[in-house]
Amino acid sequence: MNTMVHTAFIELSSRGFTHIVDITESVRRALLESGLTEGLLSVFVPGSTASVTTIEYEEGVIEDLRQAIERLVPSDVAYRHDERWHDGNGFSHVRAALLKPGITIPFLDRALLLGTWQQIVFMDFDNRPRKRRIVVQLVGE
């Protein structure tokens, strides 16, 4: 067994305010370019106002998720973070902390082991557009 590590990056621009982007194909490309056939893949977004998860990337589900996140962590209430920094994005930090910055997905035979209707999505919760650099790190053979 010869375990290897491969790191790739996905660059994107987001609109903020729970902008949800399907990054599945970019992650698949990173897997194929790694040359690895079996192992674990981690997708991680540095920063404290964004998250990565899996979901069925379908318009209705995406809107349902946006609304559920808004109900869970409303953007129109006061946050202590805003008192300190006056940047109005306290809600985005709380959302990202609850939803986490990354996920790990197994792969086998150079294929992601995702469900039929499961895609990998990036979510930006900040209150302004941002450029993001997502880390894809693979460990395997």
Image: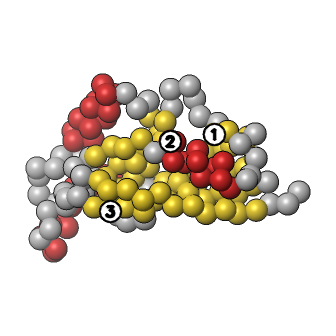
How far apart marks 3 and 1 lie (CA) works out to: 26 Å
Closer to the chain start, of discs 1 and 2, is 2
Query: Relative to residue 138, is residue 95 drawn left or right?
Result: left
Residue drawn at (61%, 63%), measured in percent from left and top? Answer: 7
Q: Is residue 129 above or below residue 76?
A: below
Query: Relative to residue 83, is residue 7 drawn left or right?
Result: right
Residue named by callout 3: 131
Identify which amino acid the numbered label 1 is placed on. Leu
Residue named by callout 2: 24
* Quarter in which the N terminus is drawn: bottom right
Residue drawn at (39%, 52%), measured in percent from left and top? Answer: 51
How far apart marks 3 and 2 lie (CA) works out to: 18 Å
Q: Label 2 near label 1: C-beta < 8 Å?
A: yes
Identify which amino acid the numbered label 2 is placed on. Thr
Query: Relative to residue 41, is residue 88 drawn left or right?
Result: left
How far apart marks 1 and 2 lie (CA) works out to: 9 Å
Residue in the foreground of this view, choosing between 41 and 98: 41
The crowding category of the residue bearing disc 3, from other C-alpha atoms within 10 Å (few below 14, some 14 to 19, many at least 20), is few
| Total numbered circles | 3
